[in-house]
């Protein structure tokens, strides 16, 4: 560009500005046209009708009208930050993932913390699971570890995900509660889903009202695989341990904070990073082989179970430091697209049926939320390593193949080719079986770990769990649902069940729940249910 008259000025960084008579930048349209008046629409006379000629007004309003994109179907409210991951030691014996080959290597990361059920504008301290999603921009592509601050999940099979989320979010006829699990739909579903009982104990604990993101643990939840250069696999569970330790607020504090400052967690992260007080976590792993997995009481493919740290201690393998807030919330925190299927060579999936279902869902949802197949062209989602492919066109394409060749193989010897040795190789596990819809027997014990978790809590923490259950269930209108929940609690801890039942005013204790999956008969509306609902 040549500076051809007084209207263009070169800034300190070499960039060009259109400048006004008095030297300030001229406001322009998105097409670059200089604007003369941004206060008044073009009209016939000062009091007359507006004119179609007013392309500046039309463009400005058109753009404003299209500012919103769909909020995430879950985890809508979130807050992100940039940072780095530093590898402690080479893990080459276990994985060929480039990020784990060299001690001291730093990899850029973007992290987004979130609540699951609340809408985008909901309050930070709602009782809810927190998302802990980490995108690591490795030298062999992005690795997204899309975790939560609770190590287990509500359901064992992805096919139940739409149901648990429908039940947890606002009820369809009344559109409330907007960010609370304390309502009939949620507890109805939970009470009919015994596999959720371990998760229920965790979410009724103080873990779901964290003091700040900086004091939270994070978990990959599922069993993943490390695969080394010799194609040997080791199972791995991922844990993030906060350097500041684990802290929560009490329920009465959470309620007050939500009223006084619904942005409490956002403000906390913003202030700590802006003041140079960078939060830090250690990435820890539990590593085990098939033999260990076979001897274990529970199925390591079942995402409602943990592997207790007493049985298999966690080992730190690196640290995560968050040291920079995004320049723009929308461009980075809103548009970041996490996907469980983003794994580099050396990290692979297990057959956990929840993980396998997630691997389908995330790509699908990004297409809708970010408006097309080119969301990886957004800087926050683009890899930071070299990348080449023949993908082309589509809405908002920012990158297209250069030159004539856009396919492979081609006889011009042009463009990138696959590499059988350096490319991603899926672990060649042997699989066989009939095509069935069946929950394995090894997924059937829904209460032992719920009991272990409850017993592991200190007396004040146990009281908090009882109080949380009492509060939540007291918001449930239907007595059948409340009693059904008490019948599950009886399988977990009798004192807990009795305490909650007494506080809810339940006169005679129900029988302990049947641990089996609900039958079709259980799902028929009971007489009591229809009376209340009418
Ligand atoms: C977000 C699906 C289970 C953690 C999402 C989103 C979808 C989804 C559709 C919205 C993504 C977006 O719009 O960007 C599912 C399905 C699941 C499942 C189908 C089970 C079958 C889980 C589990 C965890 C988890 C078990 C934790 C281990 C997250 C997190 C986010 C998220 C942290 C927010 C990511 C962000 O901050 O942008 N999930 N999810 N999800 N999910 Fe899941």
Image (spheres, rainbow, N blue to C red):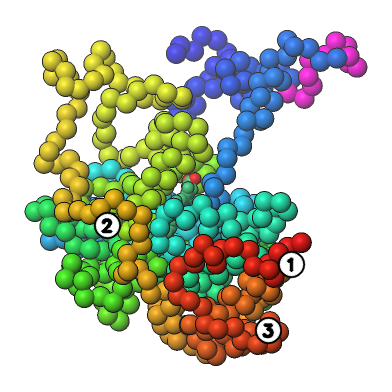
Give SS at disc 3: loop
Q: Residue at x 66, y 30 (%)?
A: 64
Please indicate, yes or no, whether residue 328 appears anywhere in the rendered image: no
> Which residue position is annotated with label 2?
350
Q: Which residues are magenta?
A: 38-48
Task: Name the residue that disc number 1 marks.
Answer: 532
Name the residue at 59% across, 58% down: 167
Residue 117 in percent (x, y) is at 57, 57
Q: Farthest right residue? A: 47
Q: Which residue lies at the image location 52% right of the left edge and 44% below the top edge?
A: 334
Depth check: give the residue in front, 517 or 259. Answer: 517
In this view of the protein, which residue sits in the foreground, 63 or 345? 345
Q: Callout 3: few (<14), some (14-19), or many (20+) C-alpha neighbours within 10 Å?
A: some
Residue 495 horizontal/vertical position (percent): 55, 90
Give me the C-alpha separation between circle 2 and circle 3: 43 Å
**Mark in front: 2 vs 3:** 3
The tag earlier along the polypeptide, 2 or 1, is 2
């Amino acid at each position: 560009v040549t500076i051809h008259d007084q209207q263009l000025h070169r800034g300190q960084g070499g960039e060009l500005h259109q400048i006004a008579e008095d030297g300030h930048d001229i406001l322009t349209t998105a097409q670059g046209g200089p604007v003369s008046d941004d206060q008044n629409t073009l009209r016939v006379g000062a009091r007359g009708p507006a004119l179609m000629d007013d392309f500046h007004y039309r463009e400005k309003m058109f753009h404003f009208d299209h500012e919103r994109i769909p909020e995430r179907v879950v985890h809508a409210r979130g807050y992100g930050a940039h940072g780095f991951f530093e590898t402690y030691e080479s893990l080459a014996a276990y994985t060929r993932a480039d990020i784990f080959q060299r001690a001291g290597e730093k990899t850029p990361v973007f992290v987004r913390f979130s609540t699951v059920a609340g809408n985008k504008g909901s309050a930070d301290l709602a009782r809810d699971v927190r998302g802990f999603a980490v995108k690591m921009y490795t030298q062999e592509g992005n690795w997204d570890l899309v975790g939560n601050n609770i190590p287990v999940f509500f359901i064992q099979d992805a096919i139940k995900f739409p149901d648990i989320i429908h039940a947890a979010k606002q009820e369809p006829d009344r559109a409330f509660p907007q960010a609370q699990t304390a309502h009939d739909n949620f507890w109805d579903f939970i009470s009919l889903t015994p596999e959720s009982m371990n998760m229920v104990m965790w979410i009724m604990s103080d873990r779901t009202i964290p003091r700040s993101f900086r004091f939270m643990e994070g978990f990959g939840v599922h069993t993943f695989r490390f695969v080394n250069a010799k194609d040997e696999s080791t199972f791995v569970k991922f844990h993030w341990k906060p350097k500041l330790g684990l802290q929560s607020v009490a329920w009465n504090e959470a309620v007050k904070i939500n009223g006084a400052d619904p942005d409490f967690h956002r403000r906390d992260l913003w202030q700590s990073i802006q003041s140079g007080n960078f939060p830090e976590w250690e990435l820890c792993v539990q590593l085990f082989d098939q033999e260990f997995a076979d001897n274990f009481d529970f199925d390591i493919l079942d995402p409602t179970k943990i592997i207790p740290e007493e049985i298999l201690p966690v080992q730190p393998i690196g640290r995560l430091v968050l040291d920079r807030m995004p320049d723009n919330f929308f461009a980075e925190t809103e548009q970041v697209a996490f996907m469980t299927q983003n794994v580099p060579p050396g990290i692979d999936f297990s057959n956990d049926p929840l993980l396998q279902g997630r691997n389908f869902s995330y790509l699908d949802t990004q297409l809708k939320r970010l408006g097309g197949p080119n969301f990886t062209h957004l800087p926050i989602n683009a890899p930071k390593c070299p990348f080449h492919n023949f993908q082309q066109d589509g809405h908002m394409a920012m990158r297209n193949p250069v030159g004539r060749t856009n396919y492979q193989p081609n006889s011009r010897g042009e463009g990138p080719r696959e590499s059988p040795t350096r490319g991603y190789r899926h672990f060649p596990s042997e699989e066989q079986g009939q095509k069935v819809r069946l929950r394995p027997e090894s997924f059937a014990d829904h209460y032992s770990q719920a009991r272990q978790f409850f017993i592991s809590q200190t007396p004040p923490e146990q009281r908090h769990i009882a109080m949380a259950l009492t509060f939540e269930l007291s918001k449930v209108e239907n007595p059948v649902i409340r009693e059904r929940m008490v019948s599950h609690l009886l399988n977990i801890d009798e004192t807990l069940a009795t305490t909650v039942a007494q506080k809810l005013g339940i006169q005679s204790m129900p029988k302990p729940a049947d641990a089996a999956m609900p039958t079709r008969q259980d799902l028929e509306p009971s007489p009591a249910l229809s009376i209340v609902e009418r």
